[in-house]
Image (cartoon, grey):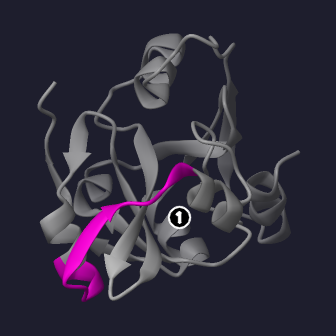
Amino acid sequence: MTPAILLLNQHGITYVLHEYEHQASTKDYGLEAVAALNLNPNQVFKTLVCELTPIELAVAVVPVSSQLNLKAFAQAAGGKKARLADPKQVEAATGYVLGGISPLAQKKPLRTFIDRASDDHSTIYVSAGRRGLEIEIAPKDLLALTRGQFAPIKSARSD
């Protein structure tokens, strides 16, 4: 039971847990979930932790079919610039390992911005707090639990 699942249970939020076998050789955790669970890549969201200038960590939740637009993210968060945070800093702040970072129940509460594309779906998938475990949840419930806000922060994937 991860902190994210405990939080959902404490608040009585409706969700579905999806588990799959994580492959250690995987580099793109979000696309691994898409393939393993046979999901729409526009409906599976990755959790990215960024460092904003002035210095602050904040969370971006964007579809795995897209990339985070750092300029749009900085603007939404009221920062001058944004860049992906150092992995060790991310793990220390969230309490989760890379590839299993959930936007829910992080060790240190961080401001969270969820891409508006989430509103296109009745449910979206986010990490449940460990590799190989996804939570299917209504975007409005994710927004409420993270005390986040919707923002247009994605751009097309370039790879």
Front residue (pair 12, 75): 75
Q: How many marks?
A: 1
Front residue (pair 48, 41): 48
Q: Residue at x 67, y 17 (%)?
A: 20
Side of 72 relative to 31 (left or right):
left
The magenta stretch is 75-87
Residue 19: horizontal and vertical position, in percent?
70, 24
Q: Residue at x 23, y 69 (%)?
A: 73
- The question of residue 77 being in magenta is answered with yes
Q: Is residue 59 above or below residue 159?
A: below
Front residue (pair 33, 88): 88
Which residue type carries mark 1?
Answer: Leu
* Residue identifier under label 1: 142
Q: Is residue 109 above or below residue 46?
A: below
Residue 140: horizontal and vertical position, in percent?
46, 68
Side of 121 relative to 30 (left or right):
left
Q: Residue at x 53, y 17 (%)?
A: 37
Q: Quadrant of residue 45?
A: top left
Q: Is residue 55 above or below residue 112?
A: below
Residue 152: horizontal and vertical position, in percent?
17, 66
Q: Residue at x 68, y 76 (%)?
A: 108
Side of 66 relative to 112 (left or right):
left
Side of 110 relative to 44 (left or right):
right
